[in-house]
Amino acid sequence: MNRGRAIAVAASAPFFFSGSKAGAAEGLASEQRAGLTELVADASDAPQTVGFSVAVSRDWSVVYQTGRGKRSLSPDEPATAGTWYGIGSVTKQFTAALIMQFVEAGALGVDDRLDTILPSFPHANELTMRQLLTHTTGLAEYGEYVASAGLLQTADVRPEQLVALIAGKPLEFAPGTRFEYSNTNYLALGMVLEQLAGKPYGEIVQERIIRPLRIDVAVSPPSSGEVARGYREGTPPTAVTDPNVSWAYAAGQLFATVGGLVAWDAALFGGRVVRPQSLALMTTPVTLPDGTPTNYGFGLSSIMLHGRRMISHDGGVPGFAAQNFVFPDDGIAIATLANTINFNLALPATKIAEVFYSGLGDALQDLEQRQAAKLDDVHLRSRAREWLDRIANASFDTSQLTPEMKAALTPEAVKKPREMLAAAGPIKKISLAGFEMLRGYRVYVYRVTGARAQLTFTFVLDEKGLIAGLFLRP
């Protein structure tokens, strides 16, 4: 789940234009440039960092771009603004846009059932395109089974192999009644595109997006150019054995440079990819039948902060992390790409956005707290507090743990978290800061206030209420 320094986690597969110098000078005040440089320097020293690249555009022209650290440790090669990285789930907005192109052509309807195109896909007669696009189907997460099936290092994984991983598994809820992010939805959409176009997903992306827009996006790592090597965090970091991510398919297969991503943003929001009506659907969060709002449209998250729309998506595949944030009404786009999966904790795109929008981070935190307050459960909060004490004292009640957690929760695993708790001092308060359903798990994020410092504690429960993950970070 990659939410910070892990104490332990249940075993699962991880998931998943450049402007002229004159334009750059005119688009960024000196104090804004200094602020960006300081943020980048701080991120360079973070433990989640090997190498990374950043691009910021204003009025859809690049005003800041840089690379720091190493795209490869052996051989020793620097990261630059032109380095290529895996973008993980940022791929989903490309897939959603392609679906909307076929909708505009009359070949598909957003409320068509999946079985009209893919009758053999699991539960196809129960699901619509809209539900697939908005993660409201209840389909099981195929990503949980990729590693155990030996597909992480397999080249040219076929989508049918991925479908087989979840064949026969029941829906986790009635379609349309709940939001739960699942890469299987975009697996199905990729296969829909292939059926409609009569060619592989990669060729569709090439023909309809990459070549006409002339942007630095690719279906697989380019054979030439500065391609980053992915790393697992550690001392020292260890290289991911194979950059191949064909198993991520239409949910997370693409590679890009930061310049390529902000050029994509300019094209998408500039009307060069889909029509305004389609873009409105992509960027309008779905509301569930019971009136519960979500923050997800078609392949994009959308929220209002300080009266401004913030459209975004992040992503991660083994060894890579990506963020793509857009403030469309101001023409501001922010892309960060890195070759360690937890880099987004070191340099959140919202920190960069604060260079332009003072107080944005506080507004986002307030929004998250208000949303979380609706889900706060005093008994669960008490249980999370109990486990902070258990971590501090290395005293574990194994009856509360999943089998994977029992094996993973070793004295060595809790050494760093114990040090963090000791440094923070006696706990004064614990409050719920966030919640989400993720692949059948309930993920609670608590803000822990100690006498000397604040920490973030992520507490993960499986469907039986057993603890499946414990994460602690500053």
Image (tube, rainbow, N blue to C red):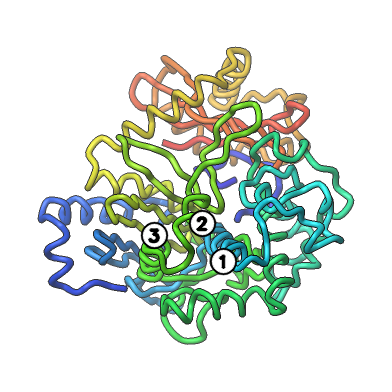
* Mark positioned earlier in the residue sequence (2 or 1): 1
Q: Say above or below: 73 vs 438.
A: below
* Mark positioned earlier in the residue sequence (3 or 1): 1
- Crowding at dot 1, Cα within 10 Å, few <14 / some 14-19 / many 20+, comes out as some
- Crowding at dot 3, Cα within 10 Å, few <14 / some 14-19 / many 20+, comes out as some
On the rendered image, what quadrant is the C terminus found in? top left
Residue farthest to the bottom? 224
Please, what is the three-letter code of the amino acid marked with disc 3? Answer: Phe
Please, what is the three-letter code of the amino acid marked with disc 2? Answer: Ser
Residue designated by label 1 = 101
Question: Going 57% across and 59% down the picture, which residue do you hit?
Answer: 96
Q: Using the image as rendered, state which of residue 459 and residue 330 is in the foreground.
A: 330
Q: Which mark is residue 269?
A: 3
Question: Going 55% across and 47% down the picture, which residue do you hit?
Answer: 2
Residue 434 in percent (x, y) is at 51, 30
Q: Is residue 20 left or right of residue 1?
A: left
- Crowding at dot 2, Cα within 10 Å, few <14 / some 14-19 / many 20+, comes out as some
